[in-house]
Structures are given as C-alpha cells and as structure tokens.
Image: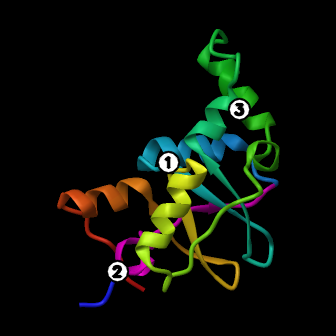
Amino acid sequence: MSPLKVRDLMTVEVLSVHPAESVDKVYDALTERGLRHVAVIDGEGDLVGIVSQEDLLRHGLAGRSDLPPVLQRVLLRQTRVEEIMTSEVETAAPDQPLEDAAQVMSKNQIGCLPVVEDWRVVGFLSASDVMKHLTGSPHPPRARA
C-alpha cells in the first residue's frame, strides 16, 4: 500500500474571496458554513492569502467586543480582506506525502494548508483532517474533482 498523499484527505470544496471584498462576507461564510479558513485569490485566480477565524477575531474585531452587534457589523463592512489576511501562506501540493504536510503544519503551528496546483487552490488540508485519519474517526463525505 502506498503512503497517503495530501489529495487523499484534503477537502476540495474551497470558499474563496478577493482581497478588496469586505470582511463581513468572510464572517458570514465562516459562520453559516461552519468553516475555519477562506482562500484569498486575485483576479487571475491565484492564491494570495488566507483568512482564518483567528485572523478575523484578532484583526477584524480586536478590542471591539464591547460594541453593539450592529456597530461590529459596520466595522466588518468597512474592513477589507487584504487588511486582515495572512499573505505569507504555507501550502501543500496534492501529491505531497501526507506526513510531509503534517510536519509543515506542526512546525509552523498552523491548522490548515491550502492545497495548490500552479497557485490555484484545489483544496484545503486541515490538522483536524489529519487527526481524524490518525484516530480512525469518520470523515465527512468529501467531494472529489
């Protein structure tokens, strides 16, 4: 049996946004879909960053929890994705050994790697995907390209 590759566990349903979009759209997507990461792509479709729940909380609403929800929403609408995104992103390739990708996540203390082919996002590999595999927990159904 050959070693597992990133493509064997990655989620291929990827939500993406553009850098100039407002952060409220990211907040809605993360909340409504139960996601933890959103890819940021440019006009050519290339990966230029990532926004995580942590980025959103740390930068989008940092120190603003005392504001009423309506004003928090206004603040999110006025903030652009490019202002809070992480632009230096570790990535994985679909055919990369799973063990290598897991080591990158562990070494860099990150919870997710965008999976890219020629800078186009084709999936996400999360630390929870790896943990579910290692513990034998069931995986949710994954769409396959």
Q: Nearer the viewer, mark 2 or mark 1?
A: 2
Neighbour tally class for label 1: few under 14, some 14-19, many 20 plus, Cα within 10 Å: some
Residue 17 colored magenta?
A: yes
SS of the residue under disc 3:
helix
Q: Position of residue 33 (x, y in %)?
A: 43, 50
SS of the residue under disc 1:
loop
* Residue at left offset 60%, top offset 19%: 69
Q: Gap between marks 2 and 1, in whole Å?
A: 24 Å
Q: Nearer the viewer, mark 2 or mark 3?
A: 2
Q: Position of residue 88 (x, y in %)?
A: 76, 58
- Position of 127 with respect to 106 (left or right) is left
Magenta stretch bounds: 4-19
Q: Position of residue 101 (x, y in %)?
A: 50, 68
Residue ID for mark 2 = 4
125 w.r.t. 59: above or below? below
5 w.r.t. 27: above or below? below
106 w.r.t. 91: above or below? above
* Residue at left offset 35%, top offset 79%: 8
Residue ID for mark 1 = 36
Colouring scheme, one of rainbow, by chain, secondary structure, one colour: rainbow
* Residue at left offset 34%, top offset 80%: 4
CB contact under 8 Å: marks 2 and 1: no
Prevailing SS of the magenta stretch: loop
Q: Name the residue type under label 3.
A: Gly
Nearer to us in this view, 57 or 30 = 57
**Total number of numbered labels?**
3
- Which quarter of the rendering shows the N terminus? bottom left
71 w.r.t. 124: above or below? above
CB contact under 8 Å: marks 1 and 3: no
- Position of 45 with respect to 92 (left or right) is right
Residue ID for mark 3 = 60
Q: Name the residue type under label 1.
A: Arg
